[in-house]
Amino acid sequence: MTKRMLLSGICAVMTLAGMPTAPAADNLVGIGTFDRDEAEIMREIRDGKGIEEYDCTFDLFTEDETWNKCLRLTAGPVRKHKVSGNGISGAGVIISGDGGKGIPVEPDQFYDCSFELKGVPKRAMLDIIEYRTEDGKTVSRVLERGLRFAPGKDWRSFKKRFRTGMTAERIELYFYIWTYVDKPGSFGNDLFRPGDSLLIDNLSLVRDEQFPKIKAMLEKSGEPFRVAPYAVESDASCPFLPIELAAPPKKIVVRAAVNEKKPLPVAIANLTDSFAQYRVTLEVPSAKRNAKRPFYDSGVFGLSGYPQEKINVREALRVKDTESKPISSRLDPLVDVNGASVISVPAKETGAVWFDFDTYDVKPGVYHGNLHVIPLLESVKYRQRGGAYSDMKPAEKVIPVEFTVDPIVLPREAVRPAHMCSPCSREEGFRLESDIGARIFNIGTRLFTPDALGNAESKVRRDIADYQRWARLRGTDIIFFVKYEALKVSQQIFNPKKNPDQKWTAWEEYVKTVAKVMEEAGVDFKSYYVLVKDEPANIDLPELREAHERLKRLYPEMRTYVSACHRTEGEIDYIDYLGRTTDMWAMSDGELARPGVFDKLSRVKSEYGAKLLHYTCSVSMREPLSAYYRRHCWRGEFMRFDADMMFRFTRSINPDYGDLSGKVIAYGEISFSIGGRVMPTVRYMAYREGMTDIKYLQALREQRGKEPEIAAFIEKAVERVVRTEANSVSAPGEVREEIRRLLLEAK
């Protein structure tokens, strides 16, 4: 292959009207191409032995013995992990800058880290470690943890954008590989052995130059505040400053299809040195608002001719996104605006209001309104004559809104059902889950106790009845997952003394209880699955197969599912081992990124007729809105899965995951629950946008999919979003607009 283009000094930026194009930024990693003197390079890197408990080596490697020098990490021998007791092998290297002091960065700035990987390990990881000075001491925190990348036999390029904290001074980049070893000769889910290597090359770290230019522009604008709509996927970390504020539009134009939930997020930047409050309303244009009476408002909420009840207005709240010091925050919970439709914004900060339009059964057409943003703490200049006000000059901003519902009808149902890994205790939560395609819901394994038999008032029966009632009201069909750890729970209920001779008797009694309770609740075998063991390892497979076989002997029609069984790769062909007794397989996106894995997993459908779904389970609120949330359903489309799953919608009252008080940060959940209410979040909205993208894709497939050019477009569109432009924030939205154009062409 030809030598790859060096990434040093390259930075792609968005050009906005009225703003100069940002110049290329300097690469802060001077050794990024690893072609300098070896001694010079080694001064800027060190091993990761102080972080992980494995031996490893790293060195410079000349790939083709002529020109292409790169950094090589070589996995060390197996060692025992101090915490888990498992065997572990791995390697790690820290890029720490000149003299090992860290790479200097500026606080509250965006940086792009680019690099290329190649090697045997099927997963490489990156942590970004941030340093600051506090009370004369150097304090560190992990800014980004466990970022996953999939190397291959050929070089692959990757890019990660991150934002430094408000007190950041330096960072380090920690690249590493690791794998658990269950027993000698049995290697874990990353399929490499001691002596295997990962190659790293063309490492670049550059500051995004557009962000500081926007900040400077707003400082010099002289305006008390600015208003602009912004993209759903905009970075929500605080201080919040979406790029759209640099060039606010004179008119807001929004387009949607029939049967769509369409968000319109609006940013309000307080550019003053004082706390401010703003009344933010969407109003039907007034016929009396003219040159002589420019400040006359209709007072009628919404858009002309658009059903008022199909517009929700929410405020984005600022919450912490970490428990580590220094505490950082982001806009995430979307709560109903107060009765006065007023939001508060601190000095030099930006708030946000989200308008959410429901176009289900709305007639196609163009609907007009005005967005009013009124600062309540600023003075108004006016004249008063005869008790009447005239010549008023308030600082209010009035922006026309044009909302078009195109003659495009999307499917009412999501293309694939979703499962959000948590129970619903409120109808409001069920509705929000249903809006993002959820049709699979949790029933806890611990609820199937002997006293639930014949007891319509037991918690399990009441939970099932609630789900059934809510589903009828929405006209949807649902299925249940009985989860988690059914085998383990069966011992706690029917074999509390842990008598090994009673193990399988207890399991069979539990299975009979599940079957009977479900029958009494009117749930047939086709409407639920049982999760016997969550994310099993090699050592768990014999027990898991035994449990499945005993379940199937009792009730051949009862269905089972397995999660993340690909962790067992290496010793047992788990598909053949469990295929005959497994009805659904849930596979992690992080593992499916590996070459060839999906081809192997497709056998569960072709040979055993089972369902296949994928899932993610990051518990970080900092996951990128576009790459993680919006693209989730795109990945399901790319892999042709039967369902999409994400951990999780809402937190349960569980000491392991916090409570509903808001004292702790979200642990993966994409809703906000407090005081008996369940509300969406910014991350929820990004997920919903991705689900809607796939509905657009399905509408195109159904209406024009038989045309060869359209069929080719659909295939390339999915490839573009998931692979070729996987790091592009704008790609999903651009593809949706192209689909819209193709659908309208056929009208």
Image (cartoon, grey):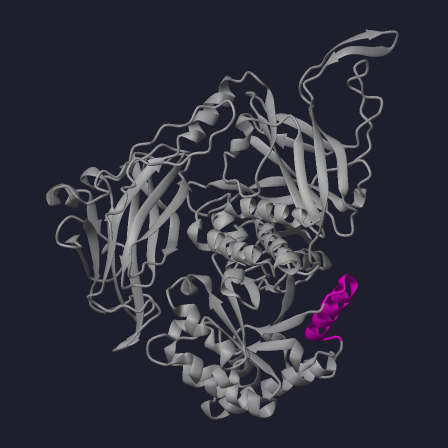
Work out whether residue 461 or residue 573 is closer to the camera in this orientation and state it: 573
Q: Is residue 93 visible?
A: yes
Q: Is residue 544 visible?
A: no
> Residue at the location (12% across, 54% down)?
65
How many labels were placed on the picture? Answer: 0
Q: Position of residue 252 (x, y in %)?
A: 66, 32
Residue range (magenta)? 457-476
> Residue at the location (34% across, 46% down)?
128
> Residue at the location (75% across, 10% down)?
382
> Residue at the location (59% across, 64% down)?
419
Above or below, 135 against 502 in this view is above
Q: Position of residue 635 (x, y in %)?
A: 50, 59
Q: Is residue 423 magenta?
A: no
Please tell me whether the stretch drawn in magenta is mainly helix, strand or loop: helix
Q: Position of residue 647 (x, y in %)?
A: 53, 61
Find residue 561 and report its image quarter.
Answer: bottom right
Find residue 181 and report its image quarter.
Answer: bottom left
Work out whether residue 356 or residue 92 is closer to the camera in this orientation and state it: 356
Work out whether residue 458 or residue 328 is closer to the camera in this orientation and state it: 328
User: Extreme right residue here?
Assistant: 386
User: Extreme front residue here?
Assistant: 708
Above or below, 114 against 457 in this view is above
Q: Position of residue 170 (x, y in %)?
A: 31, 37
Is 702 positioned to the left or the right of 545 in the image? right
Q: Is residue 459 magenta?
A: yes
